[in-house]
Amino acid sequence: MSRARLIALLTLCSLIVAAVALAASQPITPAGVGSIHIGDNYLKLRKAGKIGKVVPGCELAGPNARSAKLLPPLKGFASLSFHSPRRIADIQITGGATAKGVGIGDTLADIKAAYPKANVDHSSEEVFAFTLVTVRGGGDNRSLIAFAVDTGTKKITLIGIPYIAACE
């Protein structure tokens, strides 16, 4: 095989891999991620193969806190409501999705480019080792999407809908 053909083949393979990765990325909106939305019924999502089984949730939320793992192509978990029927209360994403093209591994500059009015809060840096960036909206200016930017790497490590549920 000639050198030119080999380079063309490698370039084509790279483009295919990039296209597949982009296609696998689920969209994050204030309503949810992909086909998982805030307020959705846990059992319906479980039967559809979108979310894993119920496991104990954050200890800081109390003894009845429960969560469930997001299933591929998503990575992360969803916190569930306390009462039956359990519903999605918040979603924490660690991979497989982007918000306006911003995803895990991107930077604060990427967030600011996609969300110019995003609020950057440095008060969480000392305790949690991340900068909290929130996209606010609605009449009450509540958090719609939140990003945790690691203070060491300066990269996004977690995206929360509608907020970051800090439990560690």
Image: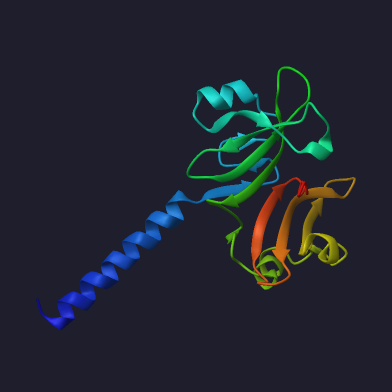
In the figure, is residue 93 to the left or right of 90?
Answer: left
Q: Nearer the viewer, residue 45 or 167?
A: 167
In the figure, is residue 71 to the left or right of 38?
Answer: left
Q: Which residue in the rendered view is the most extreme toward the bottom? A: 3
- Counting from the top left corner in percent of width and height, residue 93 is at 63, 48
Q: Nearer the viewer, residue 113 or 122?
A: 122
Q: Could you tell me which residue is drawn at 70 percent across and 23 percent down?
A: 86
In the figure, is residue 47 to the left or right of 143?
Answer: left
Relative to 161, residue 134 above or below = below
Q: Which residue in the rendered view is the most extreme toward the top? A: 84
Q: Nearer the viewer, residue 126 or 164?
A: 126
Q: Could you tell me which residue is drawn at 81 percent across and 49 percent down?
A: 143
Location of residue 32 by image quarter: top right
Q: Could you tell me which residue is drawn at 90 percent across and 45 percent down?
A: 140
Q: Could you tell me which residue is drawn at 77 percent across and 61 percent down?
A: 133
Relative to 101, residue 151 above or below = below
Relative to 57, residue 129 above or below = below
Relative to 29, residue 85 above or below = above
- Counting from the top left corner in percent of width and height, residue 1 is at 9, 76
Q: Nearer the viewer, residue 94 or 100?
A: 94
Count of numbered badges drawn on the protein: 0
- Counting from the top left corner in percent of width and height, residue 10 is at 25, 71
Which colour assignment does the render follow? rainbow
Location of residue 18 by image quarter: bottom left
- Counting from the top left corner in percent of width and height, residue 6 is at 18, 75
